[in-house]
Image (cartoon, rainbow, N blue to C red):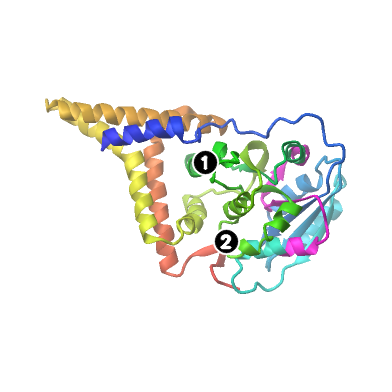
């Protein structure tokens, strides 16, 4: 098994879309567009009064040459989200964009909470042309980020340009879990394949999705993905399957400021969607957990067993197992180093990847447990299926 795991890592590093690289950044553009298209940002918000004073000014203050407006959909908040948003916009003397706050309506049957909030943002801006920018209330923007997004979309004819926001990695648990979260995401959806029109792999990153309105309308709008709990991947898949070119990559100019100070907070973030991603399939769950253990646990286990056997004078078979385990561990360690560097963390953390992967396997199993016990949460504290 150790040898098979090592061979699998050779495949992953050489033939799996270079998922481990952190180079995917916005495509280089030539000249700026002659006419900058209109952009409307839609921000689904539910109980985000703490986040908006930090993030909303950075969105309203985008240095964008074209017409830009922000629509915030208050999805049944109980903490005064709408009032905070209005007061932040009124007090922001540097705001370049106008803000509209939409009171969320009751969610129809079959619609996921966040997708319904996104739909209401589209409804409120019906008739607008150009692009819609779906972003989250916890996302902070550098002043020129939107300009770069639009320039890339226009110059490269992309219906979707999406960037994985730089997640917060300050506390001890954030530094352990967050880089691995992004690493595993790109292992599932290698940007090189997402960005290749010939590949069927598709995805998006929910904190930053710039979408050409005409392409979204042609694909049927948000109705085809109305029940999606992982809306970004579903939306990226919808657009690409409709024949559009899409792009996904990394950035440091768009950041999530939401803190996850405790392991419980990160656990909830991952367990919320892990079983959803598996299509609620027990077989997929079992395969995923076994796959994680095969890829990430077999190599260190083989190395340890080989070292013990060698010390006790056992046969060559154990030495070979230990060597294969060492090779597999070295390959996975090297593959994790670029992501650690991207998050400005020591590469000495990389050998701990098998332990982190085991933790993710437990979180995935807990995601299934929550689903079957009725404790699954779809978005911002709302129980799945709750109105």
Q: CA distance from mark 2 to mark 1?
A: 20 Å
Q: Quick one: label 1, few (<14), some, or many (20+) residues within 10 Å?
A: many
Q: Which residue is mark 2?
A: 228
Looking at the rendered structure, the secondary structure element under dot 1 is helix
Q: Secondary structure at mark 2?
A: loop
- Residue at 27% x, 33% y: name it: 3
Q: Residue 157: percent from the left, percent from the top? A: 72, 40
Question: Residue 299: x, y in percent?
Answer: 30, 35
Q: Which residue is drawn at the image coordinates 32% and 27% (left, top)? A: 327
Q: Is residue 125 magenta?
A: yes
Is residue 222 on the magenta stretch?
no
Total marks shown come to: 2
Label whose residue precedes the other's in the sequence (2 or 1): 1
Residue 34 visible from this viewpoint = yes
Give left or right: position of 275 versus 344: left
Instruction: Name the one closer to the observer, 47 or 121.
Output: 121
Q: Position of residue 133 (x, y in %)?
A: 73, 50
In the shown orientation, is residue 277 left or right of residue 41? left
Rendered-image quadrant of the N terminus = top left
Q: Nearer the viewer, residue 385 or 101?
A: 385
Which range of residues does the magenta coloring cover? Answer: 120-148
Horizontal and vertical percent position of residue 295: 35, 40
**Placement of 153 over or under 315, stated as above or below:** below
Left or right relative to 132: residue 290? left
Q: Is residue 67 left or right of residue 308?
A: right
Is residue 55 positioned above or below 28 on the image? below
Tag 1 residue: 186
Residue depicted at x 74% and y 55%? 42
Residue nearest the observer in this picture, 97 or 188 = 188
């Amino acid at each position: 098994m150790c040898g098979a795991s090592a061979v699998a890592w050779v495949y992953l590093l050489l033939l799996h879309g270079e998922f481990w690289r952190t180079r995917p950044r916005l495509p280089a553009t030539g000249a700026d567009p002659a006419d900058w298209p209109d952009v409307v940002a839609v921000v689904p918000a539910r109980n985000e009064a703490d986040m908006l004073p930090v993030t909303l000014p950075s969105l309203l203050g985008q240095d964008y040459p074209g017409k830009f407006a922000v629509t915030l959909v208050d999805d049944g908040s109980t903490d005064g989200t709408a009032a905070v948003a209005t007061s932040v916009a009124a007090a922001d003397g540097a705001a370049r964009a106008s803000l509209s706050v939409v009171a969320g309506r009751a969610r129809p049957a079959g619609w996921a909470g966040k997708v319904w909030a996104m739909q209401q943002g589209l409804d409120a801006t019906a008739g607008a042309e150009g692009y819609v920018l779906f972003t989250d209330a916890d996302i902070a923007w550098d002043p020129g980020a939107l300009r770069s997004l639009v320039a890339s979309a226009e110059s490269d004819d992309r219906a979707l340009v999406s960037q994985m926001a730089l997640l917060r990695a300050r506390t001890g648990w954030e530094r352990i879990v967050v880089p691995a979260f992004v690493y595993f995401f790109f292992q599932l959806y290698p940007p090189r394949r997402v960005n290749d029109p010939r590949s069927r792999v598709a995805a998006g990153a929910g904190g930053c999705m710039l979408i050409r309105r005409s392409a979204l309308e042609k694909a049927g709008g948000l109705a085809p993905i109305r029940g999606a709990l992982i809306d970004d991947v579903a939306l990226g898949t919808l657009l690409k399957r409709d024949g559009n070119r899409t792009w996904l990559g990394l950035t440091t100019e768009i950041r999530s400021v939401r803190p996850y100070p405790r392991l419980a907070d990160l656990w909830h973030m991952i367990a919320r969607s892990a079983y959803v991603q598996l299509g609620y399939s027990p077989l997929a769950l079992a395969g995923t957990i076994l796959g994680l253990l095969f890829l990430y646990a077999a190599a260190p286990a083989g190395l340890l067993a080989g070292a013990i056997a060698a010390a006790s004078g056992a046969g060559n078979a154990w030495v070979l197992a230990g060597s294969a385990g060492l090779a597999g561990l070295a390959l996975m360690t090297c593959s994790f180093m670029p992501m650690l560097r991207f998050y400005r963390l020591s590469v000495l953390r990389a050998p701990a990847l098998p332990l982190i992967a085991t933790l993710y396997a437990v979180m995935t199993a807990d995601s299934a447990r929550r689903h079957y016990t009725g404790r699954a949460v779809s978005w911002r504290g709302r129980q799945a299926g709750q109105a």
